[in-house]
Amino acid sequence: MGNELAWGTRYVAVDPTHFRVDYEINPFMDVAVQPDPDRAARQWRAMVAAIETAGGTVEVLEQRPDAPDMVYAMNLGLGLELPTAAGGLGHHVVMSHMRFPQRRMETGSAQQWFAARDFSTSYVGREGVGAHFEAGDAFPFGGDLVVGYGPRTDELGLKHLAIDLGVRVRGLRITHPGMYHLDLAFCPLDSTRALVCLEALDEASRAAVLALVPEPLVLTEEEALSTFAANSVVVGRTVIMPACPDRVRAQLEDWGFEVVVVAVSEFHKGGGSIRCLTNPIDLRVGRDLVSVPGGEVVLP
Protein backbone atom coordinates (compact mmCIF):
# COMPACT_ATOMS: atom_id res chain seq x y z
CA MET A 1 0.00 0.00 0.00
CA GLY A 2 1.31 3.45 -0.90
CA ASN A 3 1.73 6.18 1.66
CA GLU A 4 -1.13 8.67 1.99
CA LEU A 5 -0.73 11.97 0.21
CA ALA A 6 0.76 14.53 2.58
CA TRP A 7 -0.95 17.31 0.62
CA GLY A 8 -4.62 17.79 -0.15
CA THR A 9 -6.01 18.75 3.25
CA ARG A 10 -6.16 22.55 2.81
CA TYR A 11 -8.23 23.91 -0.05
CA VAL A 12 -9.44 27.17 -1.54
CA ALA A 13 -12.83 27.23 -3.27
CA VAL A 14 -14.90 29.99 -4.85
CA ASP A 15 -18.51 30.51 -3.82
CA PRO A 16 -20.63 29.96 -6.98
CA THR A 17 -22.70 33.11 -6.52
CA HIS A 18 -22.18 34.20 -10.14
CA PHE A 19 -21.66 30.84 -11.85
CA ARG A 20 -23.20 30.65 -15.32
CA VAL A 21 -22.20 29.83 -18.91
CA ASP A 22 -21.54 33.08 -20.78
CA TYR A 23 -19.25 31.71 -23.52
CA GLU A 24 -17.94 28.42 -24.93
CA ILE A 25 -14.24 27.68 -24.43
CA ASN A 26 -14.44 23.91 -23.95
CA PRO A 27 -16.56 21.11 -25.48
CA PHE A 28 -18.87 20.88 -22.46
CA MET A 29 -20.05 24.50 -22.51
CA ASP A 30 -23.27 25.50 -24.26
CA VAL A 31 -24.70 28.95 -23.59
CA ALA A 32 -28.17 27.52 -24.30
CA VAL A 33 -27.81 25.12 -21.34
CA GLN A 34 -27.52 27.13 -18.13
CA PRO A 35 -26.87 25.74 -14.63
CA ASP A 36 -29.61 26.00 -12.04
CA PRO A 37 -28.24 28.48 -9.46
CA ASP A 38 -30.01 26.97 -6.44
CA ARG A 39 -29.03 23.41 -7.32
CA ALA A 40 -25.47 24.50 -8.02
CA ALA A 41 -25.25 26.18 -4.61
CA ARG A 42 -26.57 23.06 -2.85
CA GLN A 43 -24.13 20.82 -4.72
CA TRP A 44 -21.20 23.12 -3.94
CA ARG A 45 -22.07 23.18 -0.22
CA ALA A 46 -22.36 19.38 -0.17
CA MET A 47 -18.93 19.12 -1.77
CA VAL A 48 -17.38 21.43 0.83
CA ALA A 49 -19.07 19.46 3.62
CA ALA A 50 -17.68 16.18 2.23
CA ILE A 51 -14.13 17.57 2.20
CA GLU A 52 -14.47 18.84 5.76
CA THR A 53 -15.96 15.54 6.95
CA ALA A 54 -12.97 13.72 5.44
CA GLY A 55 -10.61 15.93 7.49
CA GLY A 56 -9.86 18.76 5.07
CA THR A 57 -10.39 22.48 5.41
CA VAL A 58 -11.88 24.81 2.82
CA GLU A 59 -11.27 28.55 2.64
CA VAL A 60 -13.74 30.49 0.50
CA LEU A 61 -12.94 33.20 -2.00
CA GLU A 62 -15.71 35.50 -3.22
CA GLN A 63 -16.59 35.21 -6.90
CA ARG A 64 -16.33 38.24 -9.17
CA PRO A 65 -19.67 39.06 -10.85
CA ASP A 66 -17.91 39.35 -14.23
CA ALA A 67 -16.05 36.04 -13.91
CA PRO A 68 -18.53 33.14 -14.24
CA ASP A 69 -15.75 30.51 -14.52
CA MET A 70 -13.94 31.72 -11.39
CA VAL A 71 -15.81 29.00 -9.49
CA TYR A 72 -13.29 26.56 -10.99
CA ALA A 73 -10.74 27.54 -8.35
CA MET A 74 -8.17 24.92 -9.30
CA ASN A 75 -7.15 27.11 -12.22
CA LEU A 76 -6.40 30.25 -10.21
CA GLY A 77 -2.86 29.26 -9.26
CA LEU A 78 -0.46 26.67 -7.89
CA GLY A 79 -0.16 26.99 -4.10
CA LEU A 80 2.99 25.79 -2.35
CA GLU A 81 4.84 25.88 0.94
CA LEU A 82 8.44 26.91 0.25
CA PRO A 83 11.47 26.78 2.60
CA THR A 84 12.59 30.23 3.73
CA ALA A 85 16.10 31.52 4.34
CA ALA A 86 15.33 31.49 8.06
CA GLY A 87 14.65 27.77 7.96
CA GLY A 88 10.86 27.96 8.16
CA LEU A 89 8.14 27.71 5.56
CA GLY A 90 6.54 30.47 3.56
CA HIS A 91 3.36 30.32 1.51
CA HIS A 92 3.52 31.08 -2.19
CA VAL A 93 1.17 30.89 -5.17
CA VAL A 94 2.22 30.79 -8.82
CA MET A 95 -0.76 32.56 -10.38
CA SER A 96 -2.13 31.20 -13.62
CA HIS A 97 -1.83 33.09 -16.90
CA MET A 98 -5.03 31.87 -18.56
CA ARG A 99 -5.15 30.81 -22.19
CA PHE A 100 -8.50 32.50 -22.84
CA PRO A 101 -8.97 36.23 -22.14
CA GLN A 102 -12.46 35.58 -20.77
CA ARG A 103 -10.85 34.19 -17.60
CA ARG A 104 -7.81 36.37 -17.10
CA MET A 105 -9.48 38.83 -14.73
CA GLU A 106 -9.92 36.02 -12.18
CA THR A 107 -6.28 35.87 -11.19
CA GLY A 108 -6.10 39.57 -10.32
CA SER A 109 -8.76 39.17 -7.64
CA ALA A 110 -7.28 35.88 -6.45
CA GLN A 111 -3.81 37.42 -6.19
CA GLN A 112 -5.16 40.13 -3.89
CA TRP A 113 -6.91 37.52 -1.74
CA PHE A 114 -3.75 35.45 -1.36
CA ALA A 115 -1.57 38.49 -0.70
CA ALA A 116 -3.91 39.62 2.08
CA ARG A 117 -3.29 36.25 3.73
CA ASP A 118 0.51 36.53 3.61
CA PHE A 119 1.04 34.44 0.49
CA SER A 120 3.75 35.70 -1.82
CA THR A 121 2.68 35.48 -5.45
CA SER A 122 4.31 35.26 -8.85
CA TYR A 123 3.44 34.46 -12.45
CA VAL A 124 4.98 32.07 -14.93
CA GLY A 125 7.32 34.37 -16.78
CA ARG A 126 5.84 37.83 -16.50
CA GLU A 127 2.13 38.58 -16.19
CA GLY A 128 0.53 39.22 -19.56
CA VAL A 129 3.59 38.36 -21.65
CA GLY A 130 4.84 35.10 -20.16
CA ALA A 131 3.91 31.61 -21.22
CA HIS A 132 0.39 30.45 -20.57
CA PHE A 133 0.03 28.31 -17.47
CA GLU A 134 -3.16 27.01 -15.86
CA ALA A 135 -2.81 25.31 -12.50
CA GLY A 136 -5.35 22.60 -13.33
CA ASP A 137 -2.51 21.08 -15.33
CA ALA A 138 -0.11 20.63 -12.37
CA PHE A 139 0.18 17.90 -9.71
CA PRO A 140 2.99 16.53 -7.55
CA PHE A 141 3.75 12.84 -7.97
CA GLY A 142 6.86 10.83 -7.20
CA GLY A 143 8.71 13.94 -6.08
CA ASP A 144 8.19 15.70 -9.42
CA LEU A 145 5.74 18.35 -10.54
CA VAL A 146 3.75 16.62 -13.28
CA VAL A 147 2.37 19.18 -15.72
CA GLY A 148 0.12 18.69 -18.69
CA TYR A 149 0.75 20.95 -21.66
CA GLY A 150 -0.84 21.64 -25.00
CA PRO A 151 -4.43 22.93 -24.87
CA ARG A 152 -4.07 25.39 -21.98
CA THR A 153 -0.48 25.37 -20.66
CA ASP A 154 2.42 26.12 -23.01
CA GLU A 155 5.46 23.89 -23.15
CA LEU A 156 7.55 26.98 -22.35
CA GLY A 157 5.63 27.29 -19.09
CA LEU A 158 7.23 24.07 -17.86
CA LYS A 159 10.67 25.65 -18.07
CA HIS A 160 9.51 28.71 -16.14
CA LEU A 161 8.00 26.55 -13.39
CA ALA A 162 11.11 24.42 -13.04
CA ILE A 163 13.45 27.41 -12.80
CA ASP A 164 11.22 29.58 -10.62
CA LEU A 165 10.43 26.83 -8.10
CA GLY A 166 13.66 24.85 -8.26
CA VAL A 167 11.94 21.52 -8.92
CA ARG A 168 11.84 18.83 -11.59
CA VAL A 169 8.89 19.33 -13.94
CA ARG A 170 7.75 16.27 -15.83
CA GLY A 171 5.67 17.20 -18.87
CA LEU A 172 2.81 15.20 -20.38
CA ARG A 173 1.44 16.34 -23.73
CA ILE A 174 -2.37 16.52 -23.78
CA THR A 175 -4.00 15.92 -27.16
CA HIS A 176 -7.66 15.21 -26.30
CA PRO A 177 -9.98 18.24 -26.74
CA GLY A 178 -12.32 17.06 -23.99
CA MET A 179 -9.56 16.60 -21.43
CA TYR A 180 -7.95 19.98 -21.90
CA HIS A 181 -6.54 20.10 -18.35
CA LEU A 182 -4.55 17.31 -16.74
CA ASP A 183 -6.97 17.26 -13.80
CA LEU A 184 -9.57 15.72 -16.11
CA ALA A 185 -7.29 12.74 -16.80
CA PHE A 186 -4.93 12.34 -13.82
CA CYS A 187 -5.61 12.13 -10.09
CA PRO A 188 -2.90 11.10 -7.61
CA LEU A 189 -4.32 8.74 -4.97
CA ASP A 190 -1.26 8.03 -2.80
CA SER A 191 2.48 7.70 -3.26
CA THR A 192 2.22 4.82 -5.76
CA ARG A 193 -1.27 5.05 -7.27
CA ALA A 194 -3.22 7.42 -9.49
CA LEU A 195 -6.31 7.52 -11.66
CA VAL A 196 -5.15 7.91 -15.27
CA CYS A 197 -6.95 8.25 -18.58
CA LEU A 198 -4.40 7.43 -21.27
CA GLU A 199 -6.60 8.68 -24.12
CA ALA A 200 -5.95 12.24 -22.98
CA LEU A 201 -2.27 12.00 -23.93
CA ASP A 202 -0.07 11.42 -26.95
CA GLU A 203 1.67 8.06 -27.29
CA ALA A 204 4.95 9.11 -25.70
CA SER A 205 3.17 10.68 -22.74
CA ARG A 206 1.06 7.56 -22.22
CA ALA A 207 4.22 5.54 -21.87
CA ALA A 208 5.74 8.20 -19.60
CA VAL A 209 2.82 8.26 -17.17
CA LEU A 210 2.69 4.47 -16.97
CA ALA A 211 6.41 4.46 -16.17
CA LEU A 212 5.87 7.16 -13.53
CA VAL A 213 2.92 5.60 -11.66
CA PRO A 214 3.70 2.15 -10.21
CA GLU A 215 0.04 1.18 -9.81
CA PRO A 216 -2.21 3.14 -12.17
CA LEU A 217 -5.97 2.73 -12.18
CA VAL A 218 -6.58 3.27 -15.88
CA LEU A 219 -9.88 4.93 -16.77
CA THR A 220 -11.50 4.50 -20.15
CA GLU A 221 -12.22 7.54 -22.25
CA GLU A 222 -15.93 7.04 -21.56
CA GLU A 223 -15.38 6.91 -17.80
CA ALA A 224 -13.29 10.05 -17.84
CA LEU A 225 -15.64 12.09 -20.03
CA SER A 226 -19.08 10.94 -18.90
CA THR A 227 -18.43 10.67 -15.15
CA PHE A 228 -15.51 13.10 -14.64
CA ALA A 229 -14.08 10.33 -12.43
CA ALA A 230 -10.50 11.62 -12.61
CA ASN A 231 -11.62 15.08 -11.52
CA SER A 232 -11.78 13.97 -7.91
CA VAL A 233 -10.26 15.06 -4.60
CA VAL A 234 -8.31 12.82 -2.24
CA VAL A 235 -8.13 13.55 1.50
CA GLY A 236 -6.10 10.87 3.21
CA ARG A 237 -7.77 7.58 2.28
CA THR A 238 -11.03 9.22 1.19
CA VAL A 239 -11.66 9.80 -2.51
CA ILE A 240 -14.41 12.37 -3.09
CA MET A 241 -15.78 11.79 -6.58
CA PRO A 242 -18.58 13.17 -8.77
CA ALA A 243 -19.37 9.59 -9.85
CA CYS A 244 -17.66 6.24 -9.57
CA PRO A 245 -18.07 3.37 -12.04
CA ASP A 246 -18.51 0.03 -10.31
CA ARG A 247 -15.18 -1.44 -11.42
CA VAL A 248 -13.34 1.71 -10.31
CA ARG A 249 -15.04 1.62 -6.91
CA ALA A 250 -14.15 -2.05 -6.49
CA GLN A 251 -10.47 -1.36 -7.15
CA LEU A 252 -10.35 1.71 -4.91
CA GLU A 253 -11.99 -0.14 -2.05
CA ASP A 254 -9.67 -3.10 -2.56
CA TRP A 255 -6.79 -0.66 -2.14
CA GLY A 256 -8.29 0.57 1.15
CA PHE A 257 -9.88 3.82 0.00
CA GLU A 258 -13.31 5.04 1.03
CA VAL A 259 -15.29 6.40 -1.91
CA VAL A 260 -17.64 9.32 -1.27
CA VAL A 261 -19.78 10.39 -4.23
CA VAL A 262 -20.99 13.98 -4.34
CA ALA A 263 -23.09 15.05 -7.31
CA VAL A 264 -21.88 18.29 -8.91
CA SER A 265 -23.71 17.90 -12.22
CA GLU A 266 -24.50 21.61 -12.55
CA PHE A 267 -20.79 22.37 -12.74
CA HIS A 268 -20.26 19.79 -15.47
CA LYS A 269 -22.15 22.21 -17.71
CA GLY A 270 -19.10 24.48 -17.48
CA GLY A 271 -16.64 21.65 -18.07
CA GLY A 272 -15.38 21.00 -14.55
CA SER A 273 -16.07 18.84 -11.51
CA ILE A 274 -14.85 18.41 -7.94
CA ARG A 275 -11.12 18.87 -8.55
CA CYS A 276 -11.74 21.89 -10.76
CA LEU A 277 -13.84 23.44 -7.98
CA THR A 278 -11.13 23.07 -5.33
CA ASN A 279 -7.51 24.16 -5.16
CA PRO A 280 -5.05 22.47 -2.76
CA ILE A 281 -2.63 25.05 -1.35
CA ASP A 282 -0.57 22.79 0.92
CA LEU A 283 1.93 21.29 -1.54
CA ARG A 284 5.43 21.52 -0.10
CA VAL A 285 8.80 21.73 -1.80
CA GLY A 286 11.13 19.37 0.07
CA ARG A 287 8.30 17.01 1.00
CA ASP A 288 5.98 16.54 -1.99
CA LEU A 289 8.41 17.98 -4.53
CA VAL A 290 12.13 17.26 -4.53
CA SER A 291 14.24 20.41 -4.56
CA VAL A 292 16.35 20.58 -7.74
CA PRO A 293 18.67 23.62 -7.81
CA GLY A 294 18.14 25.47 -11.05
CA GLY A 295 15.18 23.28 -11.93
CA GLU A 296 14.87 20.56 -14.55
CA VAL A 297 12.34 19.73 -17.25
CA VAL A 298 11.72 16.16 -18.44
CA LEU A 299 9.64 15.72 -21.58
CA PRO A 300 8.33 12.41 -22.93
Image: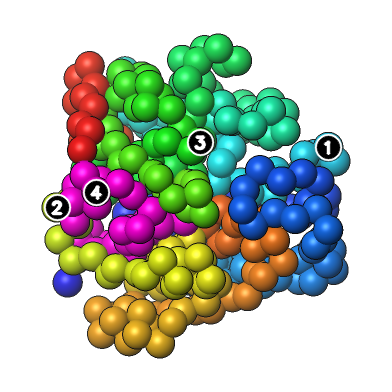
Q: Earlier in the sequence, mark 3 or mark 4?
A: 3
Task: Measure the C-alpha gap from mark 3 to mark 2.
Answer: 24 Å
User: Image point 56% across, 62% down: which residue?
Assistant: 274
**Contact? badges 3 and 1 (CB < 8 Å):** no
User: Image point 77% across, 39% down: which residue?
Assistant: 67
Q: Nearer the viewer, residue 89 or 275?
A: 275
Q: Quadrant of residue 210?
A: bottom left
- Image quarter in which the C terminus is found: top left
Q: Amino acid at mark 2?
A: Ala
Instruction: Tell me, yes or no, if residue 107 can be seen here.
Output: yes
Is residue 189 a member of the stretch shown in magenta? Answer: yes
For discs 3 and 4, the disc positioned in front in the rendered view: 4
Question: What residue would you read off at disc 1?
Answer: 66
Relative placement, left or right, of 10 versus 106 is left
Task: Measure the C-alpha gap from mark 3 to mark 1.
Answer: 21 Å
Q: Amino acid at mark 4?
A: Glu
Across and down, in percent, residue 244 comes to: 46, 79
- Image quarter in which the N terminus is found: bottom left
Tag shown at residue 203: 4
Across and down, in percent, residue 152 comes to: 50, 36
Q: Earlier in the sequence, mark 4 or mark 1?
A: 1
Tag shown at residue 211: 2
Q: Earlier in the sequence, mark 3 or mark 1?
A: 1
Is residue 292 a member of the stretch shown in magenta? Answer: no
Across and down, in percent, residue 267 comes to: 68, 61
Task: Measure the C-alpha gap from mark 2 to mark 1.
Answer: 43 Å
Query: How packed is label 4: few (under 14 Cα within 10 Å), some, or many (20 or more)?
Result: some
Task: Measure the C-alpha gap from mark 4 to mark 1.
Answer: 39 Å
